[in-house]
Amino acid sequence: MSEKPEHLRCLIIGSGPAGYTAAIYAARADLKPVMITGPLPGGQLTQTTEVENYPGYPNGRTGPEMMEDLKAQAERFGTDVRNGWVTKVDFTGPVHKVWVDETTEIHADTVIISTGASAKWLGLPNEIRLRDIGGGVTACAVCDGFFFKGQTVALVGAGDSACEEASYLAKLCPKVYMLVRKDHFRASKAMVHRVENTPNIEVLFNTEVKDVHGEHAVEGITIVNNQTKEESRLDVTGLFLAIGHKPNTDIFKGWLDMDEVGYLKHLPDSSKTKIEGVFVSGDAGDKVYRQAVTAAGTGCMAALDAERYLAAKGIH
């Protein structure tokens, strides 16, 4: 006879700033939250070397260290942090069903989704290697641009976010190469005009990155014109990827409303989804800001919404 599924008041799916902040607030509200960390415990910040724009860390902190800090704080208040991966959900009833690692069934009165989003990468071996050692390959200009002040950098992308990040970098760097795979931008006219009117941004159309050079840090990139097949080298010390993010929300398809990319929709000024008792926080529902501090803020919102939902339902 199979064991009866564990029943929780609050289940948090995913870790990172949103998940851990939700856990801190939920635990302090005595919701006895359980967190399933997901395939990347700590989230995207564990792939970041220095974090210097998060309040309260005057000397900066590495991404992994910050996540350990948040985890310790959540556990201090009683959060049960478990390694695992939610592989299936069933939101048909008032009690929400979740399966971990395809085998363990958990029932929860409230579910806080903080599964985040993953940056898209080119997939070049040296790009990934240098990214992983903090060697100058990054997917967040706002997070890391400061470290490249006064240096020449390259950015890959053609949409609004890419134009915005190129413009941001141009305020810090004397030269920004913007590499666009096609012969045109995907961005809005306003964003294109901003790039065109910034003299230290040089746009290279029909251009792709073939290789990234450098042993411990970026020392240059090889680019290729995909029309003429001509190769050349750019002497840059930073490579920024702005080719989009993919929210980690596939398991919620068919259950929750999402946009065409997969970002979860929620009510304005709220973390509530269309399913009662299911809340979203962090980058899984934020395609605009995608910062650690904003993710943490929405984690707080989700925990408060979950607490109020349980109180209104009289669930103790």
Image: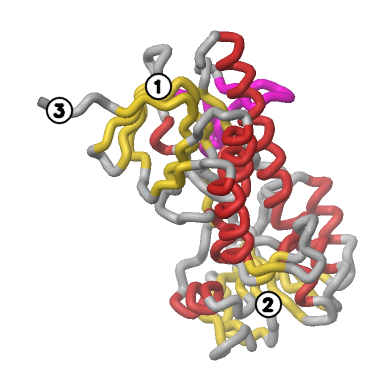
Looking at the image, is 149 positioned above or below residue 41?
below
Looking at the image, is 101 positioned above or below residue 112?
below
Q: What range is drawn magenta here?
A: 254-273
For label 3, the residue is 2
Where residue 307 sits: x, y (%)?
A: 61, 22
Left or right: 118, with 49 as reference point = left
Label 3 Cα crowd, 10 Å radius (few <14 / some 14-19 / many 20+): few
Tell us which disc is closer to us: 1 or 2.
1
Residue at the (55%, 73%) spot, across then down:
131
- Contact (Cβ within 8 Å) of mark 1 with mark 2: no
Where residue 299 sits: x, y (%)?
A: 64, 38
For label 1, the residue is 96
Earlier residue among tags 2 and 3: 3
Label 3 sits on what residue type? Ser
* Label disc, if present, on residue 238 of the rendered structure: 2
Earlier residue among tags 1 and 3: 3
Tell us which disc is closer to us: 1 or 3.
3
| Residue 265 magenta-highlighted | yes
Label 1 Cα crowd, 10 Å radius (few <14 / some 14-19 / many 20+): many
Left or right: 288, with 47 as reference point = right
Outermost top residue: 313
Left or right: 229, with 266 as reference point = left
Q: Is residue 283 visible?
A: no
> Which element carries disc 3, helix, strand or loop?
loop
Label 1 sits on what residue type? His
Label 2 sits on what residue type? Gly
* Label disc, if present, on residue 55 of the rendered structure: none
Label 2 Cα crowd, 10 Å radius (few <14 / some 14-19 / many 20+): many
Is most of the magenta stretch helix, strand or loop?
A: loop
